[in-house]
Amino acid sequence: MQLDPKKLTPMAGYVLVEPSEKTTQTQGGIYLPDNAGDKPTYGTVIAVGGSVWESGVKEITSPVKVGDQVVYKKWGGNDVKINGVEYQFLKFDDILATVKS
């Protein structure tokens, strides 16, 4: 079975993010090997799960929508590889900021 990330619906409280490409060149023009550096901590939201309830009292809705550019925690979320592309399932709390276009 082939998975299509655009057809995935994250569970309540989660979003699916496609990380941006890792930069392989420094600002000074030096090219880095593929295994150098950290994974990107920013990307594009491609799917959003439903809202969650905190202590059964307060509803917490997604702070982002599909298409938003986001910055997320370095160690947050779970990696999932689909068709050779690594995606991130993130909790709403793992998202640090949105990027204005």
Image: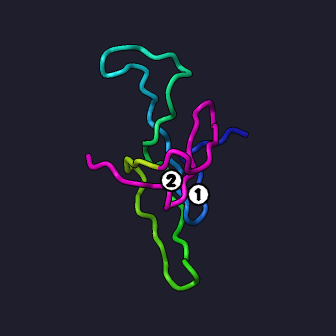
Given residues 53 and 34, the one toward you in this image is 34
Image point (56%, 41%), residue name: 87
Residue 36: x and y in percent read 52, 22
Residue 20 lies left or right of residue 12; in this view the side is: left
Looking at the image, is 48 positioned above or below residue 88?
below
**Label drawn at residue 47:** 2
> Which residue is farthest right?
1
Classify the position of the N terminus by image quarter.
top right
Residue 53 placement: quadrant: bottom right
Spatial distance from mark 1 to mark 2, Cα to Cα?
7 Å
Q: What is the crowding at mark 2: few (fewer than 14 residues within 10 Å), some, or many (at least 20)?
A: many
Callout 1, which amino acid? Answer: Pro
Residue in the image at 55% along x and 64% along y: 13
User: Circle 2 — which element?
Assistant: strand
Above or below, 63 against 67 in this view is: below
Q: Position of residue 73 (x, y in %)?
A: 48, 49
Q: What residue is disc 1 on? A: 10
Instruction: Look at the image and say whether residue 64 sits in the magenta stretch.
Output: no
- For the record, the magenta segment spans 73-101
* Mark 1 crowd level (few <14, some 14–19, many ≥20, 10 Å Cα): some
Circles 1 and 2, Cβ within 8 Å, touching? The answer is yes
Q: Amino acid at mark 2?
A: Ala
Taking the magenta stretch, the answer to whether it contains residue 85 is yes
Above or below, 11 relative to 57 = above
Which residue: 58% across, 33% down?
Answer: 85
